Amino acid sequence: MPERVRLILIIMLLSLVFVSFDYVCHANAAEPPSILIIVSKPPPDLEISVKTGDSYVRADKITRAVENYYTFYSRHLEDVRDYMFRVTTGDDSFEIVIDKPAKRYNQIYTLNLANRTLIPGKSFSRSVLLISIRVILTLIIEGIIFWVFGFRKKDHWIAFLIINVITQGLLNIWINGFVPIQSYLVLNLIAAEILVFIAEIKAFLMLIKEQRLRTILYVLTANLMSLLAGGYIITVLPV
């Protein structure tokens, strides 16, 4: 097997370690939402309520960039029988009924306002767009640092692109699996970045033979900067 192919496989295997991690439970964490509804580019006055007995309970609303998250906690759903949701905006109102969720917490739905439907999970197009944005921003940040550290050769940039597309792609696919308002996401990101750092150190040292100390310092600096940027991004942009 060619050395470059073997190296790519090693990077993928090391990076996939954190993809297999399950969510960490914390005894003192805030209660996660039972149902979270994602609405992209919603009207400012859009509200979502769930029917409980003869009345409706309105969801808590969180705004994040171009999205709103409408969350229902277990206390909202104590008297819910039919899981009927009422969507209201301006003078318009309609109702949607869904099947009873299989799990108690972290059920995600996406509201399609045009079709007036609630779709389980995050939309594929949304996930692809957000993952692409985060990966591109990371490549720009780390690419600038790569240039500042004096890497100019074509082979160096090929190695940079191969390694970072794999590691950052897998990292952001993993991040996409979290609930958008997941507690402790930044702490999980820090743990994952440590694994990314280990994988990238090994990969860069195998592909760039000269100036090993400079390579190590670059990887350390680049991952620290991308961690700081990533921590900020996930607090202001949708996940």
Image (cartoon, rainbow, N blue to C red):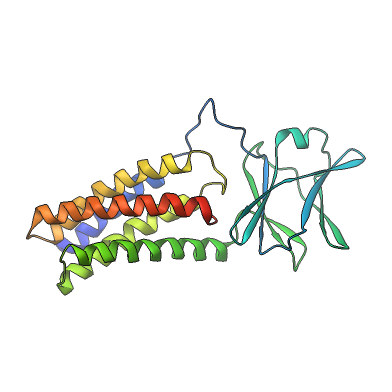
**Residue placed farthest to the bottom in the image?**
154
Residue at horizontal 26%, vertical 48%?
197
In the visual, does 107 lie left or right of 51? left
Q: Where is residue 88 in the image (x, y as percent from the top left)?
A: 82, 57
Residue 239 appears in view: no
The vertical placement of 51 against 29, above or below, is: below
* Front one among 89 and 179: 89
In the visual, does 135 lie left or right of 100? left
Q: Where is residue 48 in the image (x, y as percent from the top left)?
A: 78, 51
Q: In the picture, residue 59 is in which quadrant? A: top right
In the visual, does 183 lie left or right of 48? left
Q: Where is residue 235 in the image (x, y as percent from the top left)?
A: 51, 50
Q: Where is residue 105 in the image (x, y as percent from the top left)?
A: 64, 38
Residue at horizontal 86%, vertical 59%?
93
Residue at horizontal 58%, vertical 59%?
65
**Residue placed farthest to the left in the image?**
210
